[in-house]
Structures are given as structure tokens and as C-alpha cells.
């Protein structure tokens, strides 16, 4: 067993079911002070003492003890070890290696226990305060529990617990797992030790026992989990959650989501107790209230004293949503989501307009229909972030929605991604958009929608817009020059996402035009062109652009298909001379493929990652030309530059693509995704200044090698 820097065991063997990490003869001291020769065998879950049969000379077990039951361990004298257990009494033995055994055992034991389970420790030279759990502590805790009761390990859980520490993610998603309630219980039991896991997505149990009990036992001890989503049916054990949160004075729980739960009205009392016993701020019901009206269910919950702490409420895939009644309980709500509730968006906005108690910051009405025109004076409940994704519009309702959203005293962010026009008349949309000027919109998400030249005119006419996302849009070749000209000339846009998806992406030549235009811009700081085939020439053009334009602070270009170690090395070496700090994504997928092909060595990857970290830090000793920071006496014609026609492979379909959204969630770098950041800004990964070998530690090669083996 590897204990992460701990002394290796001196007698090490592996069996089919577990790993024996201690196996040696000791002198056991019994209650009368008599010494009996015993074989000590210790594994992940428990220790055992074996004695030699006087007749057969075969070993037989004489004593066993579980690490979870350890109360105290003492090793003051170098050759004497004492262990006290809850149910198994006291074991005392002497051996010349007693101190080494004690340190080995306690390092393992503290890797499977949470602080409240720690035994009293009296070991010479060992201080609990200095102990740091290992990277796979949750895996060790899981194995110890399952082995301790003689059960079989779940290969699915083993895989998850082995791999998630290498991903950097703070979420574990079991929503599609087919696991028994007992397996879920073991899994959640193991996670209470790991502070990295903050969000859990749990499925419906595959057997007759529900997952409410396992979740309750987790919440009673876990001080790290901040949110959960569970797709379990309601039963009487749901009330255990409220009791668990009452017992845990250190809970960090802030978000609860219930999916397909079928709550009865009686469940409202237990839910109210959960809210009172926690610091929950975010409450979500997805097809969870099926037999009663949503307002009738929320009413008793709203009367609990801590309901005013709820600032985010989601009602999705629900029937019987009487919006006017529901809004009565939303005075404390800042983020309101009403998705797929079977009510026209115009009627929802009318109810919101009539409500006098709302103080919204974000309003999400995605996955509904909007077939009526929206009035200019619509107040959207005061929300400055409006999300209308996967909505079916008419020409009149979409254009009037945009105009109403922009007719505010304060700037608003608006997401209209993956929209559908009922007649398919996008040209009618753009003819009206080009007439709109100086709208109070500072962020717009147009992902997955059709783009025509008049949309670019709309962006040019509304200089309040500073963040633009056109990810996965079908962009024809005649539109590319308009986009390139806009990028060259805008001095207000600071973040642009023009990345592709599995269906729609820029051709290499279109990408080159966009990147060259970026070289002339001096306002864009964050740029995303990922999921775009750059090829080797594109990487050279990109490095030239980043040297010519040093205003750019972050750029995302993952999944670009460049499979040349030399070109990647040249790219990073060029940017070492940039001087100004630049956040770059690591091309993980490309490097994995190069490793698999034997086209790059681990040493070369380590060197490139060192350079990546240095680029991120910047070099203050490099003199930066002023023309790379601002435009100097350069006039740009507002006319679209004429370019030779180039073949485009962009698709023309713009239907909702759920699979693409799922793929995007797996990306380890942030994108300019207005919905995910609430249109409040762009998440940029921060890399602190480091020195020497720390540069390599930041980007461990083991992670890539591990992923290759896993695949």
C-alpha cells in the first residue's frame, strides 16, 4: 500500500481482496504479563494476531481488531506498542520495530478517519497537528469500510474514487449510476474525509431501500459538501435529512435540488425543518412536486423563519404553477428560474410586472415558449441578468424581447442561446435588429443561433455590449469578413467567445481571418476559439497575434487538433518573449494523443508546462512595445474588407444540442458561458507566481499518464 510519503512497510504482500501492509512476528504481552509469540498481520480495515498451533504448526487467528474502533494508541517506549479498542479490549506487544509499526499504522488510520473519529495518540515524535490526509484518502476509507465487513468492492465506485482527485473537479456525479442503497451509503461514507468534494449528484436507488438514509448519514458528518442534487422518490426516511442537519453544527450545505421526487404536501414540514437547520440559500425543484400545486407546497415552507435566507429558487418541469401565487413567496429571491412550466413567457412577465415584492438579480425563463409581443416597459422584476435559452419565439416576440430588455436604466445581460423562430424567418429578426441602437445591454449570448451580417451591424450599433458569446453558431463564409472587421474595429468588447461545438465550428481559414483581426484589436482581453481546427499554421498565426496584441489576458484554444510537439514547443517558446502575463489553457487532449503516439516525451511535456507557467506569470524585464498595447495613429475603415471566398464547413442547423452542452460541462477550462456565470463576468484561472520545481508540481505529468491508462 502506498501511504503517500510514509515509510514503506518492511514486509509487503498483496492478496486477492486486500493489501497486507504489515506482516511480522511480535511478542504479545497478556494480562498476566506472560509473553506469547504471535504473527501480526495488518491490512486496510483491521489487524489480526495469529498463533501457531502446537500440534499442526499451522497459523490460526487468535484476535482481530478494526481500525474504526481504535480509541487509543501508545508507543512511548521504542519497542512496546499498546492499542485500546472500543469493543476488542487492549492489545500490547513488544518488538524491535514497534515504533515503526506504530507510525505506519497511525498514518494509515488517520487517512481513513475524520478528526472526530481520531483515537488518542501517544507516539514518540508524532504530532496529529502536522498530519495532512493523502490524495486518495476517500478511496482508502471506502476500502477499509467495505473490507471491514467482508463485502465486495464496487468497481464503479473504485473507478470514481481513484480518478476524481486527478481531475481538479469539486463535483462527483452519480446521477446515472445503477447502485444499491448500501453502495451509495459506502460511497458517501468515504467522502466525508475529503474537503475537495463540494457537490454531489445522486441517483434513485436501484433497490427497495431509498438513498435518503445514506444522504442523511453523510450530511450529519460532512462539513465540506455545499450542495446536492438527488433523483430519489419521496418516502418516510426523507425526514432523516432534517435530523442530520440539526446534529451537524459545521455543515456547509447551501444548495438542495430534488429531481422527480413526487413530494406530497406532508413533505413540506420536513423540508422547512431542513431549511431551519441549515444555511441553505439555493432551493431547486425539478419535476419534484407532481400531485399538488407548486404555490400550495411552497406556502408552508415560506413560513419557516429561515426561508428569508433562500435567495435562489428554481421550479422546472412542473405543472400546476400559478405564477401570480408563487411570486407572493419570492420577496427574498434574487435568482428566480421558471423553466418548462407550460406558461407563455409573456404571461410570466406580466405576473412579474404586477408583483410589488420582487427584487430580482437574475431571471431565467428558459425552455418555455414566447409567442406574444413583450411591452417596452417590462421591468423583469428588476433583474439585470435575463436568460431565455432554448425558447420558441415569433419574430415579433424575440425582437420586442430584446428591445424591452435593452430599454432599462441599467445595463443588462441577455442570453438568447439556441433559440427557435416558429416560422424560421431569421432574416426578419435581423432586419429589425439592425435598427436597434444604444440598447442598455452589456452582455449577449447568441450561442447556437443563426448569424447574418445584420447581426454584426446590431453589435456595432450597441456599444454598451462588452461581452459577446457566439459559440457553436453556424457561420457562413460571407459572414466571416463582417466578424473579422467588427473584431478589428471594436473598442468596447472585452470578452469574445467564438468557439465551436461538435456540429458547428470555424474552418481553419475562417479561424485564421478571425485571429489576424484579433491582432489589430486593443480592447478584447478574453478570447475563446476552442473546438476549432487551427492546424499547425493556425498555431503560428496565433502566437504572432499574441505578440502583436498584448492587451489579451486570457485565451482558450483547447481541442484544436494540432498534433505536433515541435509546433507546441515553438508556440510556448515564442510567447516566453511576450513579457505581459497571459493565461493559456493547457492542450491536454492533444498532448494525450501525442503521448499515445509516442510523438512527445514526458520530459518535453514537463518543459512545455514550465514555459506555460512562466508565460502566465509574465516577465517584467521585457520591454513591451507601446503599439502592442494601444492603437497608435491607425485608422480603420468601417467598411467590410473584401476577401477571397473560402470554402466553409459550418453547418446550417441550429437546433438545441443537449449532447454538446454535456460535452462542454466536461471541459476543464472556463468558457464565456453567460448562463453559467450569471452574466456577471468571466471566470479566469489564476496561477500564482511560483519558482523552481514548483512549476512542474502545478501541472503533474502523472495526471496525463493516469488518464491514458484509464482509457
Image (cartoon, helix red, strand yellow):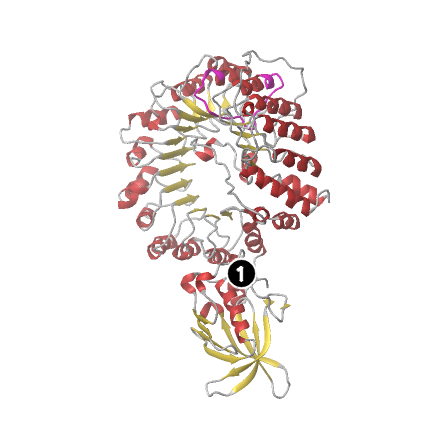
Local SS, label 1? helix
The residue segment tinted magenta is: 460-481
Nearer-the-camera pick, 672 or 383 = 672
* Residue drawn at point x = 38 percent, y = 31 percent: 362
Instruction: Decide if residue 637 is in sight here.
Output: yes
Residue 50: x, y in percent?
57, 79
Q: Which residue is mark 1?
A: 140
Q: Is residue 465 magenta?
A: yes
Residue 397: x, y in percent?
43, 19
* Residue drawn at point x = 49 percent, y = 79 percent: 92
* Residue drawn at point x = 51 percent, y = 57 percent: 138
Residue 228: x, y in percent?
43, 47
Nearer-the-camera pick, 148 or 560 = 560
Q: Is residue 531 magenta?
A: no
* Residue drawn at point x = 68 percent, y = 44 percent: 604
Residue 367: x, y in percent?
46, 30
410 relative to 638, above or below = below
39 relative to 668, above or below = below
Q: Residues within 10 Å of mark 1 (few under 14, many from 20)?
A: many
Write down the quadrant of residue 617 in the picture. Answer: top right
Write down the quadrant of residue 95 in the picture. Answer: bottom right
> For the N terminus, which image quadrant?
bottom right
Instruction: Decide if residue 650 is in sight here.
Output: no
Q: How many marks do you count on the picture? A: 1
Tell me the chief SS of the magenta region: loop
Nearer-the-camera pick, 167 or 189 = 167
Amino acid at each position: 500500500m502506498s501511504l503517500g510519503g510514509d515509510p514503506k512497510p518492511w514486509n509487503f504482500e498483496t492478496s486477492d481482496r486486500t493489501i497486507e501492509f504489515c506482516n511480522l512476528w511480535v511478542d504479545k504481552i497478556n494480562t498476566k504479563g506472560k509473553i506469547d509469540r504471535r504473527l501480526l498481520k495488518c491490512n486496510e480495515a483491521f489487524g489480526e494476531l495469529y498463533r501457531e498451533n502446537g500440534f499442526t504448526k499451522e497459523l490460526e487467528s487468535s484476535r482481530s481488531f478494526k481500525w474504526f474502533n481504535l480509541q487509543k494508541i501508545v508507543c512511548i517506549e521504542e519497542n512496546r506498542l499498546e492499542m485500546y479498542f472500543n469493543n476488542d479490549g487492549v492489545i500490547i506487544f513488544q518488538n524491535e520495530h514497534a515504533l515503526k509499526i506504530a507510525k505506519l499504522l497511525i498514518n494509515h488510520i488517520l487517512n481513513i478517519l475524520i478528526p472526530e473519529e481520531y483515537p488518542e495518540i501517544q507516539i514518540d515524535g508524532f504530532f496529529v497537528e502536522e498530519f495532512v490526509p493523502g490524495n486518495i484518502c476517500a478511496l482508502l476509507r471506502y476500502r477499509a469500510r467495505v473490507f471491514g465487513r467482508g463485502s465486495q468492492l464496487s468497481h464503479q465506485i473504485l473507478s470514481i474514487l481513484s480518478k476524481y482527485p486527478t481531475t481538479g473537479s469539486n463535483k462527483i456525479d452519480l446521477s446515472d449510476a445503477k447502485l444499491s442503497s448500501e453502495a451509495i451509503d459506502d460511497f458517501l461514507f468515504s467522502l466525508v474525509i475529503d474537503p475537495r468534494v463540494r457537490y454531489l449528484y445522486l441517483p434513485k436507488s436501484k433497490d427497495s431501500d431509498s438513498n435518503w438514509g445514506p444522504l442523511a448519514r453523510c450530511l450529519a458528518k460532512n462539513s465540506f459538501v455545499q450542495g446536492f442534487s438527488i433523483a430519489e422518490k419521496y418516502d418516510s426516511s426523507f425526514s432523516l435529512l432534517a435530523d442530520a442537519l440539526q446534529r451537524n453544527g459545521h455543515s456547509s450545505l447551501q444548495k438542495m435540488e430534488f429531481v422527480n421526487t413526487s413530494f406530497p404536501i406532508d413533505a413540506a414540514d420536513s423540508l422547512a425543518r431542513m431549511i431551519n437547520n441549515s444555511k441553505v440559500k439555493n432551493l431547486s425543484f425539478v419535476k419534484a412536486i407532481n400531485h399538488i400545486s407548486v404555490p400550495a407546497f411552497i406556502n408552508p415552507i415560506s413560513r419557516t423563519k429561515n426561508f428569508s435566507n433562500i435567495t435562489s429558487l428554481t421550479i422546472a418541469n412542473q405543472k400546476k404553477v400559478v405564477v401570480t401565487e408563487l411570486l407572493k413567496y419570492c420577496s427574498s429571491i434574487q435568482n428566480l428560474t421558471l423553466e418548462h412550466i407550460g406558461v407563455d413567457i409573456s404571461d410570466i412577465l406580466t405576473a412579474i410586472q404586477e408583483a410589488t415584492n420582487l427584487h430580482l438579480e437574475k431571471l431565467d425563463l428558459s425552455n418555455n415558449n414566447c409567442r406574444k409581443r413583450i411591452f417596452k416597459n417590462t421591468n423583469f422584476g428588476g433583474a439585470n441578468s435575463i436568460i431565455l435559452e432554448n425558447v420558441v419565439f415569433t419574430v415579433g416576440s424575440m425582437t420586442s424581447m430584446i428591445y424591452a430588455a435593452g430599454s432599462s436604466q441599467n445595463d443588462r445581460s441577455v442570453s438568447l442561446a439556441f433559440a427557435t423562430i416558429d416560422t424560421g424567418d431569421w432574416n426578419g429578426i435581423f432586419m429589425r435588429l439592425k435598427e436597434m441602437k444604444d440598447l442598455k445591454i452589456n452582455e449577449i449570448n447568441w450561442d447556437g443561433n443563426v448569424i447574418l451580417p445584420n447581426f454584426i451591424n446590431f453589435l456595432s450599433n450597441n456599444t454598451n455590449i462588452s461581452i459577446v458569446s457566439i459559440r457553436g453558431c453556424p457561420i457562413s463564409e460571407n459572414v466571416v469578413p463582417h466578424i473579422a472587421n467588427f473584431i478589428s474595429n471594436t473598442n468596447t468588447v472585452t470578452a469574445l467567445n467564438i468557439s465551436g461545438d461538435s456540429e458547428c465550428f470555424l474552418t481553419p481559414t475562417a479561424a485564421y481571418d478571425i485571429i489576424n483581426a484579433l491582432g489589430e484589436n486593443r480592447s478584447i482581453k478574453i478570447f475563446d476559439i476552442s473546438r476549432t481546427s487551427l492546424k499547425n499554421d493556425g498555431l503560428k498565426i496565433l502566437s504572432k497575434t499574441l505578440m502583436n496584441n498584448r492587451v489579451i489576458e486570457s485565451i482558450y484554444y483547447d481541442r484544436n487538433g494540432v498534433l505536433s510537439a515541435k509546433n507546441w514547443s515553438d508556440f510556448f517558446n515564442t510567447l516566453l518573449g511576450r513579457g505581459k502575463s497571459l493565461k493559456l489553457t493547457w492542450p491536454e487532449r492533444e498532448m494525450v494523443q501525442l503521448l499515445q503516439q509516442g510523438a512527445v516525451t514526458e520530459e518535453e511535456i514537463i518543459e512545455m508546462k514550465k514555459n506555460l507557467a512562466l508565460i502566465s506569470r509574465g516577465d517584467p524585464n521585457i520591454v513591451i512595445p507601446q503599439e502592442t498595447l494601444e492603437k497608435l495613429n491607425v485608422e480603420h475603415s468601417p467598411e467590410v474588407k473584401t476577401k477571397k471566398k473560402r470554402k466553409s464547413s459550418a453547418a446550417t442547423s441550429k437546433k438545441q444540442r443537449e449532447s454538446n452542452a454535456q460535452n462542454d460541462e466536461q471541459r476543464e477550462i472556463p468558457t464565456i458561458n453567460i448562463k453559467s456565470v450569471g452574466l456577471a463576468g468571466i471566470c479566469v484561472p489564476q496561477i500564482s507566481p511560483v519558482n523552481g520545481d514548483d512549476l512542474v508540481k502545478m501541472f503533474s505529468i502523472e495526471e496525463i499518464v493516469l488518464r491514458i491508462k484509464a482509457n
